[in-house]
Image (cartoon, coloured by chain):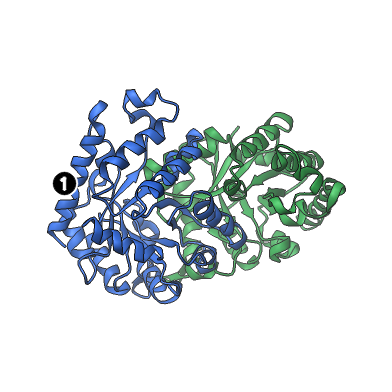
Chain colours: A green, B blue
Amino acid sequence: MNFVEAIGCSWKNNKSLLCVGLDPDFNRIPAHIRGTDEPIFEFNRAVIDATADIVCAYKPQIAYYAPWRAEQQLEKTIEYIHMNYPGIPVILDAKRGDIGSTAEMYAREAFERYRADAVTVNPYMGGDTLEPFLSYREKGVIILCRTSNPGARDIQDLEVCGEKIYMIIAAKAAREWNREGNVALVVGATYPDELMEVRSIVGDMPLLVPGIGAQGGDVEKAVLNGKDSKGAGMIINSSRGIIYAGKGKGFADAARKAAAELRDEINKYR
Amino acid sequence: MNFVEAIGCSWKNNKSLLCVGLDPDFNRIPAHIRGTDEPIFEFNRAVIDATADIVCAYKPQIAYYAPWRAEQQLEKTIEYIHMNYPGIPVILDAKRGDIGSTAEMYAREAFERYRADAVTVNPYMGGDTLEPFLSYREKGVIILCRTSNPGARDIQDLEVCGEKIYMIIAAKAAREWNREGNVALVVGATYPDELMEVRSIVGDMPLLVPGIGAQGGDVEKAVLNGKDSKGAGMIINSSRGIIYAGKGKGFADAARKAAAELRDEINKYR
């Protein structure tokens, strides 16, 4: 079962399009966990145990581990999900991209070291730089298309013969890069019109949708514009809005409550 | 002294535009080093000691460390250069790029954990994603512009009102992003015409130029088209052509010989 099939199952099994972003900022981890030997892992484990039956995926952002030399806690987090919740795919958010021989190393990092089920990649360097990732046929390759930040306009919205760069990426993803059926795209919830345009090009390809919550994206518009023909097709990520929903000892319960509410709100519009 | 000033000094002091890429492929490390406790660090140290007086910079590629859990050896390599050859800047090749709060973490990774003097970044997500890097005013931010791989054409060569994307990046780098004087660009040696076009836009901004050697770039064309008004302005990288120039116990001497030859060839055309 490849990543796209696996995410299809978890959408169904957990009746959820919600992905929880595991971006643990050390300074926001509750004090009673901060003092443990592996505070980042312990924090993640509590969030995971509290939410695993109501999410479709987890998405650790590697940038939140690297500055603190916490790679081993990232490995442990992913292993913990695989061991305890094998139906829930793990997306490593890393936005890697480099020439072929180097991209091979990055693919190894994501898929062999961290054993992620999918990784996010940056298409700026071109199709050949995606190949080493795409050649892992069981794994998902989630290509940046239209991101959720304000500056996304700078490059992604430039028009080539009336067609914006992100539309060109969407078309290439659907027509060239998806030979193995393992491609998905990142399209931010903060730009619902763009979400609809991309959906119109890529059929039922899964979209990873950041930007709900702290970044201000509207759930109703995002789901109505981004869902696929079966009312699924979206991996809607929330990080800060869930993992920091509460403080102190009740943080995991608060995370579950926030996740359940967001899942239910998403489901209203499917 | 910021990165751009520091590289200016090392161009002069070592009479060299050559940067050695520290991309140690574990399988190509000589057998007598492979058995040590820190083979990647030991390999790098030998290459560094053999070349430090004839290079302008070192560029470790983080992708060659991450799959092998060799982050600590990368830290040690950079620290070794700083301690023993303080005039030689270290560029961390990581091609990072993400939204602001995440980019802050990547900037910490490069500049605080690894203590690199400069880092390569990907501009696809837009100007706001570069800001957390740019705000480290002493550090260099080396933005992908026109890369050395065949697929570079896919996105970077698309034309917007007659202007190619990489030209737009070059113009933004020169006019918007370089407020602190700490920006440089990546332009591949494999495309000398593009090198000349970018040079015509960015004045004397430093260019990091990969693609010489294993990737087939021509030294004469690259230098004639890419040099700045003072016959410098380029950080010309070679990795495999130098670090694997020899095998077995003589590998470091072979690396020095290859580096000296390439430096001299580059200097012919300055």
Of residues B167 and B106, the one nearer the viewer is B106
Q: Count the marks.
A: 1
Name the residue at 58% across, 49% down: A67
Name the residue at 32% across, 42% down: B48
* Label 1: few (<14), some (14–19) or many (≥20) C-alpha neighbours in 10 Å: few
Q: Position of residue B240 (x, y in %)?
A: 29, 40
Of residues B75 and A119, the one nearer the viewer is B75
Q: What chain is tagged by disc 1?
A: B
Q: Visible in this render: residue B235? A: yes
Name the residue at 76% across, 57% down: A241
Amino acid type shown at disc 1: Glu
Q: Position of residue A198 (x, y in %)?
A: 57, 60
Q: Mark 1 — residue? A: B261
Q: Position of residue A107 (x, y in %)?
A: 48, 39
Furthest residue toward left:
B268
Height in image: A248 above or below A154? Answer: above
Q: Position of residue A205 (x, y in %)?
A: 58, 49
